[in-house]
Image (tube, helix red, strand yellow):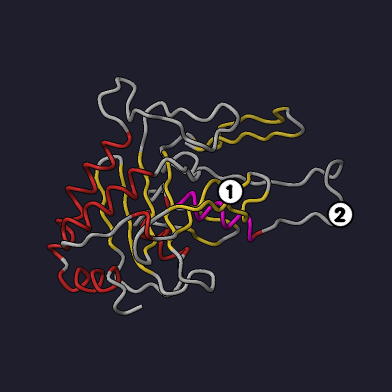
Amino acid sequence: MIHRLVYKRGSINSDETIKAEPTKDVISVRFTPDELIFDKDFYFRNEFINEYIKRYSTVNPEIKFIYNGTEILSPHGMKDFIEWKFDDLLLPTIHISGKGIDLAINAARNLNGKVKNQYTSFNNAWNGYYSPETKSFITSTVTTLNNYYGLSLNIENYYGLMLQPADEHNPKEFYMHEERFPGNLVGALWIKINDPLYNISQRRTLSSKWLDKAQTITVEDFVSKFIETELPKYLNANPESTKRLKDILMKKQL
């Protein structure tokens, strides 16, 4: 079925079914600027729009977006996010997915002109906002790598940056906050939370403690158990990347 709604200045101008036969699930949006609101010099800031669509696509890997004829698709979720956001990656991206969770880790030589550590997390697929609820991400990853490699990496000895939510009025700006993460790692984590809770002053900061409404498992426990179980499995199955990652963590080749 194809159904069309036309809005103008907050009112529905038309509401009609164009085709009754079954069709694929597709949503098409066409925007025409209102001449009473926008002046003749109106134009789309494509760099902002593309940024939002690309970010949204990485947390909705099953959806294909077409913006002004350009396809935007991220079938590998957080892996695509890492490889889109960071240049000069040193490894094949470590990509581990499970029910309600998607994790990607890599290492980069040059981040914005400096070797620093960055990680990002997402909550739920519908908004694609960054969230600072990632302490368990760092702690679990460091603990797992220490145990796997027999290292003694100390979170307090490393400097990194955390990307927090983009300003909703300026989507290319990110709030940078100091955090700790070993080596020269970049990471992205997405988790699905039922009935997510947000900071009362803004919907961009996740404050959920529990993963589900029944409060059967916390966000921290869910992330920790997944990383501590699945990351060693990946490392065992990919010996070449495993050795390279160890060298990077020990700062032998950077």
Residue 192 placement (x, y as % from top left): 36, 37
- CA separation in Å, label 1 and label 2: 29 Å
Which disc number belongs to residue 40? 2
**Is-magenta flag for residue 53?**
yes
Amino acid type of the residue tagged 2 in the rendering? Lys
Q: Is residue 245 magenta?
A: no
Q: Quick one: label 1 or label 2, which is nearer the N terminus? A: 2
Say which residue appears at 52% left-offset and 42% top-offset. Answer: 27
The magenta span reads 47-57
Residue 218 lies, in percent from the top left, at 30, 30
Q: Residue tagged by mark 1?
A: 166
**SS class of the residue under badge 2?**
loop
Question: Secondary structure of the magenta portion, mostly?
Answer: helix
Residue under the point 41% across and 26% down: 195
Crowding at dot 2, Cα within 10 Å, few <14 / some 14-19 / many 20+, comes out as few
Residue 82 in the image: state x and y as whole percent. Answer: 41, 61
In front: 27, or 94?
Answer: 94
